Amino acid sequence: MKTILLTKAQLQIISRSTLFQNITPSSLELIFQDLSADLHHYPEPSLFASEGELCKGISLVLEGSVEVKKIHISGKETTVTELYPGDTFGEVIIFSDYKHFPSSLFSRKNTRILHIPEEAVLSLCKVKPDFLRNLMGLLSNKVWMMSNKVRILSYDRLKQRVASYLMHQYRIQDTSNLTLPHNRQEMADYLDMPRPSLSRELQNLKNEGLILYHKYQFTLLQPEKLESIL
């Protein structure tokens, strides 16, 4: 069995991740001394997993970032999401009947990723109840997020999609002053609309006195009226 050496900074990132929360860095150090895991380093931007490629475990970003992209037949690339230190991927599909990545994964410059094989994940579930609880919570949250995205995309009118997205963030953050998790292009991709269309709908909502915004910061001036669009 190969033992990997993790720095204190890396152990801190792992302990703050959703998957390993409530497990201290000192405990993690002991866990990874006996756990079969791999540490991958990508010094330059690269494609490290293609759509359709077999997923063999759960991975966690330690440094840098990972772009999840959908490559269309036409050659067009759509960014599905971007993963940062502490974020994981593979947990949704590793125990499914179809263990293949639904999108392609690209590393940014100087990215490090911790990979935990399927058998090691199963071992952790048996010996670490906190890990099993975290994994179940992570999966439940992602299923809920996917259900919400399907609901948003069920709206035919683009204005309704934007309003639904903003109201969703309003409920999550429990405030009218929002910090959105997506930039404009990511938001457009998430809502399945061209970026110019998104900009137009946001400007329309602003002109109607429903919202104010600057970059990632949004203020919902009249949440009730925004919800009435749906």
Image: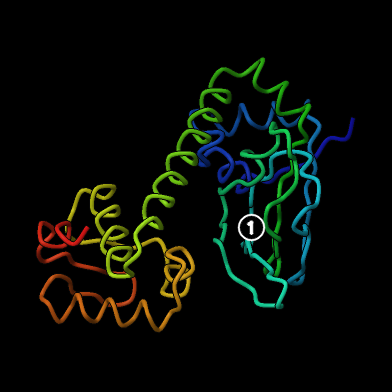
List the residue tagged with mark 1: 63
Q: Give the left or right position of residue 33, taking residue 7 as reference.
A: right
Instruction: From this view, report whether residue 28 is shown above or below residue 46.
Output: above
What residue is drawn where x is 73% and y is 33%? Answer: 97
Pick whichever, 207 or 129, lies toward us.
207
Query: Residue at coordinates 65% horizontally, 65% vertically from top-left?
Result: 70
* As drawn, 208 above or below 60: below
The quadrant holding residue 195 is bottom left
**Residue type pointed to by label 1:** Glu
Q: 155 or 161, which lies in front?
A: 155
Pick the residue in front: 230 or 180: 230
| Outermost right residue | 1
- How far across and how far down the image is residue 202, in percent? 27, 76
Residue drawn at (32%, 59%), measured in percent from left and top? 165
Which x, y percent locates residue 186? 47, 69
Tell whether 16 sits left or right of 107. left
Q: Residue 91: percent from the left, percent from the top?
A: 63, 38
Q: Residue sitting at 41 percent across and 74 percent down? A: 184
Tell me the element at label 1: strand
Quarter of the rendering containing residue 98: top right
Task: Classify residue 81 by image quadrant.
Answer: bottom right
Where does the C terminus fall, quadrant-wise? Answer: bottom left
Q: Quadrant of the N terminus?
A: top right
Query: What kind of colouring is applied to the model shown?
Result: rainbow
Q: Is residue 62 above or below residue 198?
A: above
